[in-house]
Image (cartoon, grey):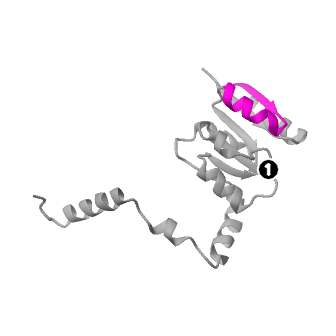
Amino acid sequence: MGQKILIAEAHEVLRIGLHSIFAEDRNVTSVCDIEHEKDLPEQILHSKFDLAIINQELAIDMSLLQKTKFAIIAYEPDVAGLKAAYKYGACGYFSVNVSAELLRTLLRSTENSFLIEPSLTPPIMEHLVSSTHLPLEELLVLKREEIICRSHRGFNKLGVIRK
């Protein structure tokens, strides 16, 4: 059974281009296009898509997308949009200039994977390096269960015997 794709893009030229990229793939049986933000919640809630490609401008409430495999494309990528996409379970974040090959990779991406267009890496790294406050607590704090599991594995590697 083939995959069903949703493209949510306001700009006709980009919408047609995205449509043609996925329509050419043998694994895709249908591509649905929407161009208005107001149509997105209805499509997401009432239709089953294997993948949704959504322009960041239309993805006002990404929490609606949590149960859908989706990727965000942006005319002007920004860190807040990238973070929101990651937070709500997107499988990728791209500029509108993303290659067809990278977009088709999304059709075969695994659960919990997150692809970032390579050309976006320098600005993201610049943001991380230039930030005066890195949220280290988010990076370093582990859940208690993870700490216990890691400690347990570490002790066992050292030869500590559990009673």
Q: Residue at x 65, y 51 (%)?
A: 85
Q: Is residue 77 left or right of residue 86?
A: right
Neighbor class of circle 1 (other Cα within 10 Å; few <14, some 14-19, many 20+) is: some
Count numbered badges in the picture.
1
Q: Is residue 146 left or right of residue 30?
A: left
Residue 89: x %, y % from top left: 59, 46
Q: Residue at x 41, y 62 (%)?
A: 142
Examine the rendering and report whether any part of residue 155 can be seen.
yes
Region rendered in magenta: 24-47
Residue identified by numbered label 1: 96
Indicate the secondary structure of the residue bearing disc 1.
loop
Q: Residue at x 21, y 65 (%)?
A: 155
Q: Is residue 38 magenta?
A: yes
Q: Residue at x 71, y 56 (%)?
A: 81
Q: Residue furthest top?
A: 1
**Quick one: 101 or 145, which is closer to the camera?**
145
Q: Is residue 137 left or right of residue 79?
A: left
